[in-house]
Image: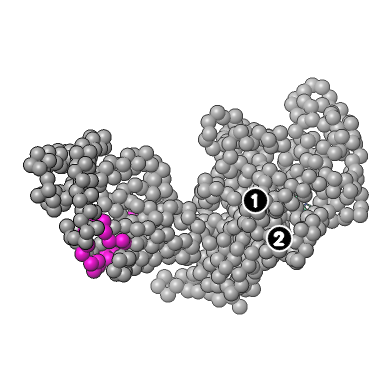
Amino acid sequence: MAKIKIDINSGKVVKPNIVVGIDLGTTNSLVAWINPQTNKAEVIVDEWGALLPSVILLKPNSEPIVGVLAKETLLEAPERTIFSVKRLLGISQHEIASVQQFLGYHIVEDETDSMLRIQVDENFYNAVELSAMILRALKHKAEKVLGVQVFQAVISVPAYFNDSQRQATRDAGKLAGLNVLRIINEPTAASLSYGLGLNRTVSQTILVYDLGGGTFDISILQIEDGVFEVLATQGDTRLGGDDIDHSIMAFWQGKYPALVNCANPRDIQALRLLAETAKIFLSNNTDLIFTEWFEFSNNSAAQSEDIEPVKIEKVALSLDYGGLVTAAKALVLKTQACIVAALRDASLKPSDIQALVLVGGSTRYPEIPRVLSAQFPHLIINNFLNPDEVVALGAAIEADVLAGNREDILLLDITPLGLGIETAGGLMDLLIPRNTKLPCRVRREYSTSVDGQINLQIAVFQGERGMVKENRKLGEFILKGIPAMPAGFPKIEVIFALNADGLLTVYASELRSGVSQNIEIKPQYGLSDEELERMLLDGFEHAQSDLQARGLQETINEAQQLIYSVSRFIAKNTGMLSATQLADTMQRIDSLKRLLNIGSNKDALLQGITALNDFTRPFAENLMNIAVASALKGKEI
Ligand code: ADP
Ligand code: MG
């Protein structure tokens, strides 16, 4: 019996809060959830199955069609059928050149470095919008099958995705009407689906081998105390099952000269799909031979309204498992080399790997587990779950954690905004830059700027701006009871410790006396996605002016500090200086003060600082020598 929750204030039935896990793939995408009845992760299946082909058909004046129907139109309308969108996220025109020949659609030739665009009819689309179409289709699929609305999701991305690619994925989620609770690394999700990392007492080093349609990723993960850390990633963003398909096509084109005439986009796509069919067939039937008739028009202009009648040609294509192995040889070798490189990056030997997880449809090709067994003879390979589904299942498990349903796992995350403290003049001194992996710990030393200072205020801020007043104050405390010492003498150590939950603890202590103090802060508390985004954007927008403001403030601080220390020096050593030395020094101090008071620019201040510094340095050094000499004689000055 399912339980029903009722809100006693409104008297309304509370709909269960469902957070789905999404694998937004290059070739196929999936959505999964934790079935509350069984408490197990399940992929959501509709009448089309579990996999939603990541293919979009864009027709004029109609909603985009995503999935199987769109994949089928690759043949009829390659110019308006978009696939491999994930490859377009965060890349430039220059990089797309290598795959352009296999894409039937039009990528806008653009001189700028801006986001890549696709043109269909009169409309332009970027990769974020296209990804959002796929995500919206997954959202609808889940809502249709589960019968509830879905607003929250965890979306997976490759471990190597950079910040802008992760942000683009988040943006796509938002555009699709989803609140993206977290972006999870695909290898982390795959490991979770096998239960790796769920037992907090077990520490393990895992290698995740993900061979999909168009991408290959190796990740070495370290799980400790339920926390995942990526030790190394390797791979190739242009390597995958598609390469086997292309290689089979090339093999056939060499073997059957008639295929020279197979040139129009529609026929090329048909040949590509047939190559894929052959590959999958032989992977499942290694001792059979694949044979199929292939028909194509031998007129490359056949797509246009050419008056010439289209002549049809027919070729009987065939392939056996040996042919497949030959076609896939280069790919398999490349993936093996990547494993070696990943192990080297992580400074590990094959025997250090304690678990191996296979992900991606292409790992069903039997040669893959075979060569991996040879490379890692001590391991049992985790490939008993469906390699297409493990990422989505793991994302669903993570979604469940974030929904607050499980407390046994923590996942390594990154800080979205920088964390620091306020220093003299309202400057933001950054201790933890944004995108630092959690958990982390940073220590920095400070001192006092005034003689005899016994209290020090530590104010903690979050944000990307140079001055604290533009950032968000998280909290403050006062380090009290510092023994009175000359300015610059106390050694004040500040430590920022951010744990895996994102909880920040700030410690401050004066090292000479041992006085210490600390506070705990939740940096993300009460910060919405929109605010977070605005703070990030503000940081980018003002980067240049912030740098200038910061430079000026640092110079002001330097001038004030110099005035303070020279005045102190003169007060202490009045008797040792001539009347002219004194008068000239005072005059330079006054003119520097005046520059500060009238709010001068950085250059004017720097000149004032130099004038005072250059004048006082010779006699200060002279006095220092006397001081050192008398100190050596055991006298006090
Ligand atoms: P992606 O992560 O890029 O979306 P998938 O993990 O869905 O990709 O894998 C898709 C690839 O897996 C395609 O190249 C497909 O041809 C290949 N594939 C699927 N099933 C098999 C199989 N039985 N044998 C070999 N390759 C397969
Ligand atoms: Mg994948």
Relative to 122, residue 410 above or below: below
Residue 180: % across, % down: 52, 56
Please tell me whether mark 2 sits on a helix, a strand or a loop.
helix
Residue 294: give its label.
none
Quadrant of the rendered image containing residue 312: top right
Whether 188 is drawn above or below 114: the answer is below
Could you say which quadrant of the image residue 154 lies in?
bottom right
- Please indicate, yes or no, whether residue 389 appears anywhere in the rendered image: no
**Which quadrant holds the N terminus?**
bottom right
Callout 2 amino acid: Pro
Alpha carbon distance from label 2 to label 1: 15 Å
Determine the secondary structure under disc 1.
strand
- The location of residue 222, given as percent across then percent down, is 60, 63
Q: Looking at the rendered structure, which numbered label has been put on residue 350?
A: 2
Residue range of the region highlighted in magenta in the rendering: 472-492
- Residue 227 on image: x %, y %: 55, 66
Q: Residue furthest left?
A: 579
Q: Residue at x 62, y 45 (%)?
A: 86
Please give the name of the residue rendered at 61% of the width and 49% of the height, measured from the top-left corner.
Answer: 134
Question: Is the residue marked 2 within 8 Å of ligand 2, measured from its CB?
Answer: no
* Residue depicted at 85% across the width and 48% down the height: 325
Residue matched to label 1 = 234
Q: Nearest the camera: 199 or 550?
A: 550
Residue nearer the viewer, 320 or 21 = 320
